Image (cartoon, rainbow, N blue to C red):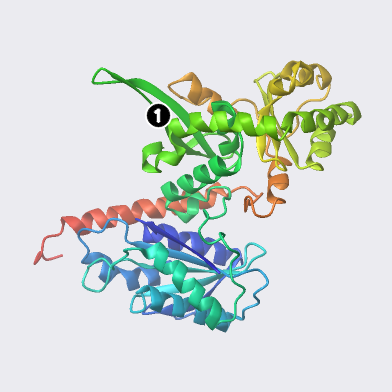
């Protein structure tokens, strides 16, 4: 069993995310402790917030008050609702949250049934619960629970690896943590030789990255800034410096990865294996959709970039088998954007959006907003078990807007609570 723990500022945002799942019949409430129950027996955000409010009201210091964990047994572990509920309760007790108010949801939105637990990191006195070495303790607890509940243990090394990467879920909150995990996973699993190729990989997961260069106190500096983007390529949320994620996804690490990838691609003869497959697809395809389908069957994704007039000016291939991404020009002139423009000039690129005109400050930012055709690419990626746990479907941004609105309301409530002085009459 794998447990994923995250923190957040907005209790309302996390509850809103789970309410959407319940409303769509993709989740059910399994268990709750120290929580108000609605008269009609249905899940209510209002009742949950009333349950959490006494804890939140006396908190003055802890900013990330949300404890959000998902428990993920092996897909072959067939647990009843009662067993999954007992598993969640035992996990919370062992981790030190046994006396907290919390609610357990069973999610069935993917093939693997799993549990989500929403609670608080502050106790009834307003004091933060000790979270020292929480990840290490959680791993130990998972091993204990595997034995107690006779679960299939994780394979060696799987528990210590980064959590499987999937398309960023803005509704789930803790965006910085999600972005960092995705960037680290992309950096560790894929070979790429340029900044543009790295950015293209990240955009498959609704993240973009920009280079920043300048001078500070007479010394030049270079860095990276990561941002979340929606399915149209528009930025949402606040950009985050790479330093917030650690050196593994910083500018220097990226430069070193370029050299490492170049050697690996040459050693594995990636270009030599791609050329005949792509050439055959170009010959056999009647149109661009046929071309992508033929490559998809070989676990290769093709991403075309086009301007407002529909002209193809860029093409990139993602080889999921060899875990490498290469611009068409790296394979030779016969695979450049101009060749595909001539080949498919009478076959418009379907399902692709024209270049998004976003108010970005630099040319790098502008190029990062160029739309990508996700058709086929995400399906190919999702078929590679053990690399990425990608959800091919896009996010519902109406749901995201709802969750963000509730997050804002919660932030306003927290600000008002902090302004209240002891003894002040309300």
244 and 332: which one is in front? 332
Residue 25 falls left or right of residue 89: right
Circle 1 sits on which residue?
A: 223
Q: Give the residue displayed 49% in from the left and 19% down from the top.
A: 363
Relative to residue 285, is residue 139 depicted above or below? below
Which of the 4 image quarters holds residue 113?
bottom right
Q: Secondary structure at mark 1?
A: strand
Relative to residue 89, is residue 282 depicted above or below? above
Residue lying farthest left? 423
Q: Can residue 356 be seen?
A: no
Residue 115, x across and y down, in percent: 53, 70
Relative to residue 286, is residue 143 depicted above or below? below
Q: Give the residue displayed 33% in from the left and 56% down from the top.
A: 410
Badge 1 density bin: few <14, some 14–19, many ≥20, Cα 10 Å: some
Residue 239 falls left or right of residue 276: left
Which of the 4 image quarters holds residue 243?
top left
Quadrant where the N terminus is found in the figure: bottom right
Quadrant where the C terminus is found in the figure: bottom left
418 and 202: which one is in front? 202
Residue 287, x across and y down, in percent: 85, 29
129 and 59: which one is in front? 129
Residue lying farthest front? 267
Residue 227, x across and y down, in percent: 46, 37
Residue 225, x across and y down, in percent: 42, 33
Q: Give the residue displayed 82% in from the left and 43% down from the top.
A: 297
135 and 229: which one is in front? 135
């Amino acid at each position: 069993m794998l447990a994923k723990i995250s923190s957040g500022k907005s209790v309302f945002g996390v509850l809103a995310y789970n309410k959407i799942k319940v409303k769509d019949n993709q989740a059910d409430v399994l268990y709750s402790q120290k929580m108000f129950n609605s008269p009609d027996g249905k899940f209510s955000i209002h009742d949950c917030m009333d349950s959490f409010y006494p804890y939140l009201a006396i908190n003055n210091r802890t900013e990330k008050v949300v404890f959000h964990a998902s428990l993920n047994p092996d897909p072959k572990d067939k647990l009843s609702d009662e067993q999954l509920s007992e598993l969640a309760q035992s996990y919370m007790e062992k981790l030190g949250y046994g006396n907290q108010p919390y609610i357990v949801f069973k999610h069935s939105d993917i093939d693997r049934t799993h549990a989500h637990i929403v609670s608080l990191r502050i106790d009834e006195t307003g004091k933060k619960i000790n979270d020292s070495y929480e990840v290490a303790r959680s791993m130990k607890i998972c091993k204990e629970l595997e034995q107690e509940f006779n679960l299939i243990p994780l394979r060696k090394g799987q528990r210590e690896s980064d959590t499987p990467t999937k398309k960023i879920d803005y509704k789930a909150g803790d965006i910085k943590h999600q972005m960092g995990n995705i960037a680290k996973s992309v950096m560790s699993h894929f070979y790429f030789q340029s900044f543009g190729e790295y950015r293209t990989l990240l955009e498959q997961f609704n993240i973009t990255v920009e280079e920043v260069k300048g001078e500070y106190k007479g010394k030049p500096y270079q860095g990276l800034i990561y941002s979340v983007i929606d399915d149209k390529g528009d930025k949402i949320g606040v950009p985050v410096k790479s330093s917030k994620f650690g050196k593994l996804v910083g500018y220097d690490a990226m430069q070193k990865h370029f050299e490492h990838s170049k050697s690996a691609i040459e050693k594995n003869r990636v270009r030599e294996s791609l050329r005949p497959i792509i050439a055959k697809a170009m010959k056999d395809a009647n149109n661009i959709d046929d071309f992508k389908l033929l490559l998809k069957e070989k676990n290769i994704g093709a991403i075309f970039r086009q301007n407002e007039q529909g002209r193809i000016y860029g093409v990139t291939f993602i080889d999921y088998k060899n875990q490498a991404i290469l611009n068409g020009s790296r394979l030779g002139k016969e695979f450049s954007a101009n060749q595909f423009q001539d080949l498919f000039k009478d076959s418009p690129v379907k399902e692709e959006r024209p270049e998004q005109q976003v108010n970005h400050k630099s040319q790098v930012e502008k190029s990062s907003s160029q739309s990508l055709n996700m058709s086929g690419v995400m399906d190919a990626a999702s078929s590679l078990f053990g690399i990425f746990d990608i959800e091919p479907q896009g996010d519902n941004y109406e749901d995201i807007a709802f969750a963000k609105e509730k997050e804002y309301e919660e932030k306003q409530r927290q600000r008002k609570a902090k302004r209240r002085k002891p003894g002040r009459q309300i």
